[in-house]
Image (cartoon, rainbow, N blue to C red):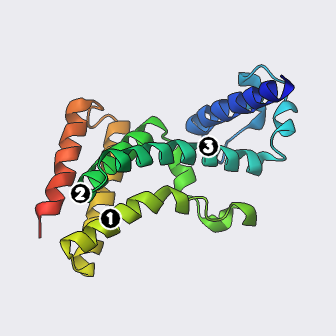
Amino acid sequence: MAGENRKSKKQELLLAGVQELNRHGIVDFSVRRVAEACGLSPAAPYKHFPNKNEFIAAIISYNYSLWYTKLHAIVETYPDDYRRQITEMLVTYTCFLVENPHFRSALMIKDDALDSSHKGLRSNLSKLPNEAAENYREWANMPMDVFIRKKFVLRSLMYGAALMFENGELAYNEDSLEMLRAMTDREFDLP
């Protein structure tokens, strides 16, 4: 029973930590505010996480695991359709960025800003999309220069759409997501 309580408190802290990260970003992240949000003492998070950096790394890992689960479901849904995998991953990733705005700063953090035990956390995030992209490139017999250009365009589209959704330039709704999906898919047909 004590293990279940400990796990649930840790889970509660991680979820509150995600909200803290979304509200305040990495720079202004406060373990004290997370503890407060959970109705715990300021020292309580340190029973689960040795320090603030470890806590932030655990939040990043938690988000990565959620992201990986979504990506894996896309691969399972469209096992041999790499184009569709890439399109759905891009739309899903855009939604993830919109729904977790400050997590973007965690995605952009340079590995050298993390301690040695957490370097490479981001590599897991792009593993499945990179595999889908490489599989598509091989299937389509796409030259590397075209592949690099398309990858740039698609990433720009994803980050640009997330920014436009976030700042209200574009409504964050099914119609806009369908437009993003169509524009992503269209890029595959362009030279």
Relative depth, front residue between 187 and 124: 124
Nearer mark to the viewer, of 3 and 2 = 2
**Which amino acid, by three-letter code, is at mark 3?**
Tyr
In the rendered image, which residue does mark 1 sit on? 133
Residue contact between numbered discs 3 and 2, judged by CB atoms under 8 Å: no
How far across and how far down the image is residue 133, in percent? 32, 65
Q: Measuring 30% from the left and 52% from the top, which residue is drawn there?
A: 85
Between discs 1 and 3, the one toward the N terminus: 3
Whether tag 1 and tag 2 are in contact, CB under 8 A, the answer is no
Name the side, left or right, on which 3 lies relative to 110.
Answer: right
- Sequence-wise, the earlier of marks 1 and 2 is 2
Q: Is residue 73 visible?
A: yes
Give the total number of marks visible in the rendering: 3
**Badge 1: how crowded within 10 Å, few (<14), some, or many (20+)?**
some
Near-viewer residue (3 or 16): 3
Quarter location, residue 141: bottom left
Residue 91: give x, y in percent of width and height: 31, 45
